[in-house]
């Protein structure tokens, strides 16, 4: 099964790194800031980290090479997408087939048996205009999955970690290698945004942070999926800052990785000063899909709430640097410019060649509701996808002038450090 194969490959890479490190599960888990049982599950293929930060920390503890970090990131993207497909499939099981009335005619009871053939049963009327396997019409549908006839890209053996020289020589020889390219976009939300309708009018579809499409026409199959992580800091406990309308005694300690969305929801928190959203874009088949452009649309912009600001520990190390973009808001018409000569859009994706886009939105003196529009094309088709947070806009607010509280790593309480005098 494809899902099991993708997750099994990712687990095999983790086991190889763990074995090479010479460390026990307990030692690795402690250094990677996760529980021993959780690490066991990942290495056995019984789970996939919801956040790449956990994978990155594990790989750094195991002293992975840059090439291995790239390959592990690629494998995690595919495993995470496979997990999401399995989750959606489990949430929408196939309907149980109706009993066939003709079965009764084939096996009559002794009391009703006779030489006279039974009257023919009328053929059942069709219940759907959809072909077998079609998703049917609903208010919210998942992005189309590859059909059973879709060729599955050949998988590589997970033993690539042996030597980097062998890996790159295989690439030069023409071996198909899947690499997830990580890019980032920095967008400033300090003022009112652009026309929320965009140049193409109403978006052709909506992708929530769960990666689902809400296009009004399911027959218009979108040839890509987008899985979104709303809080995608390399280490959320170190970098995340949030506005919360509670005193310190009513705020639980900060969490990391996949626990962040639940912590934010439980406290009614708002991302403060900056929010880093990760979009994993992957094609649904072998056809190439081009990401033509990305646009940030501001729904509304107001005054930040007068709440306390809470941030995680400042005593932990920085994460792996990712390629980033910047925008000069002093310009008459600000544009997004890649830093250090990095290339911007367009990008190409397919089922075996996903792409991760990091969008960092910053605000200093406004409370902004916003979403992302992704324009794509494939062959003669094109469309626009709206990407938001579970059907509602992302929300990022400035925290200037608000009391700031910090919770040190391993600490037991929040303590006040300063009042924000600037945006960051």
Image (spheres, rainbow, N blue to C red):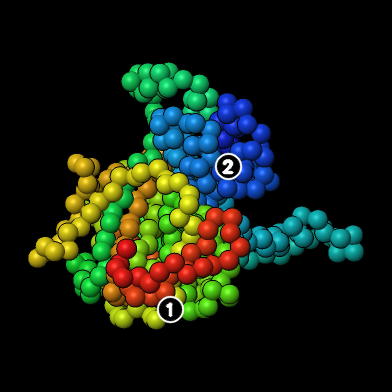
Along the horizontal axis of the image, is 120 left or right of 142? right
- Residues at circles 1 and 2 in contact by the CB criterion of under 8 Å: no
Asked whether 257 or 145 is in front, the reply is 257
**What residue would you read off at disc 1?**
307
Q: Quadrant of residue 270?
A: bottom left
Residue at 35% x, 41% y is 181
| Residue 70 horizontal side relative to residue 50, left or right | left
Give neighbour class at mark 1: few <14, some 14-19, many 20+ (Cα, 10 Å): some
Calculate the distance from the C-alpha at mark 1 to the C-alpha at mark 2.
34 Å
Residue 263 coordinates in the image, percent (x, y)? 55, 66
Quarter holding the N terminus is top right
Q: Earlier in the sequence, mark 1 or mark 2?
A: 2
Residue name at image x 54 percent, y 55 percent? 409
Is residue 66 among the parts visible in the rendering? yes
Residue holding disc 2: 31
| Residue that appears at 54% across and 67% down | 414
User: Looking at the image, can residue 375 be seen?
Assistant: no
């Amino acid at each position: 099964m494809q899902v099991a194969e993708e997750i099994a490959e990712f687990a095999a890479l983790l086991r190889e790194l763990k074995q090479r490190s010479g460390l026990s599960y307990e030692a690795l888990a402690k250094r990677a800031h996760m529980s021993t049982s959780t690490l066991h599950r990942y290495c056995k293929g019984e789970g996939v980290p919801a956040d790449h930060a956990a994978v990155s920390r594990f790989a750094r503890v195991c002293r992975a090479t840059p090439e291995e970090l790239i390959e592990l990131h690629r494998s995690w993207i595919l495993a995470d997408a496979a997990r999401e497909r399995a989750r959606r499939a489990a949430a929408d099981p196939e309907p149980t087939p109706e009993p066939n009335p003709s079965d009764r005619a084939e096996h009559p009871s002794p009391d009703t048996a006779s030489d006279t053939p039974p009257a023919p049963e009328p053929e059942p009327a069709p219940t759907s205009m959809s072909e077998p396997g079609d998703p049917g019409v609903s208010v919210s549908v998942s992005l189309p999955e590859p059909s059973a006839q879709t060729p599955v890209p050949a998988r590589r053996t997970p033993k690539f970690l042996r030597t980097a020289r062998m890996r790159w020589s295989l690439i030069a020889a023409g071996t198909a290698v899947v690499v997830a390219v990580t890019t980032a976009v920095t967008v400033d939300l300090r003022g009112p945004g652009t026309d929320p309708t965009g140049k193409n009018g109403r978006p052709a579809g909506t992708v929530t942070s769960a990666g689902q499409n809400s296009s009004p026409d399911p027959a218009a199959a979108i040839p890509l999926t987008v899985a979104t992580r709303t809080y995608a800091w390399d280490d959320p406990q170190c970098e995340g800052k949030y506005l919360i309308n509670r005193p310190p005694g009513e705020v639980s300690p900060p969490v990391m990785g996949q626990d962040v969305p639940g912590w934010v929801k439980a406290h009614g928190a708002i991302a403060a000063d900056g929010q880093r959203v990760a979009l994993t874009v992957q094609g649904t088949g072998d056809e190439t899909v081009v990401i033509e452009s990305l646009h940030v649309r501001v729904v509304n912009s107001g005054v930040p709430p007068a709440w306390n600001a809470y941030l995680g520990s400042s005593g932990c190390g920085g994460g792996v640097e990712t390629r980033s973009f910047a925008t000069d808001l002093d310009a008459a018409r600000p544009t997004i410019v890649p830093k250090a000569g990095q290339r911007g859009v367009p990008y190409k994706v397919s089922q075996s060649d996903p792409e991760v886009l990091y969008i960092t939105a910053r605000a200093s003196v406004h409370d902004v509701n916003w979403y992302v529009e992704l324009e794509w094309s494939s062959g003669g088709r094109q469309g626009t996808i709206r990407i938001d947070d579970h059907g509602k806009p992302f929300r990022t607010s400035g925290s200037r002038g608000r009391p700031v509280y910090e919770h040190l790593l391993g600490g037991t309480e929040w303590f006040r450090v300063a009042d924000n005098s600037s945006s960051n």
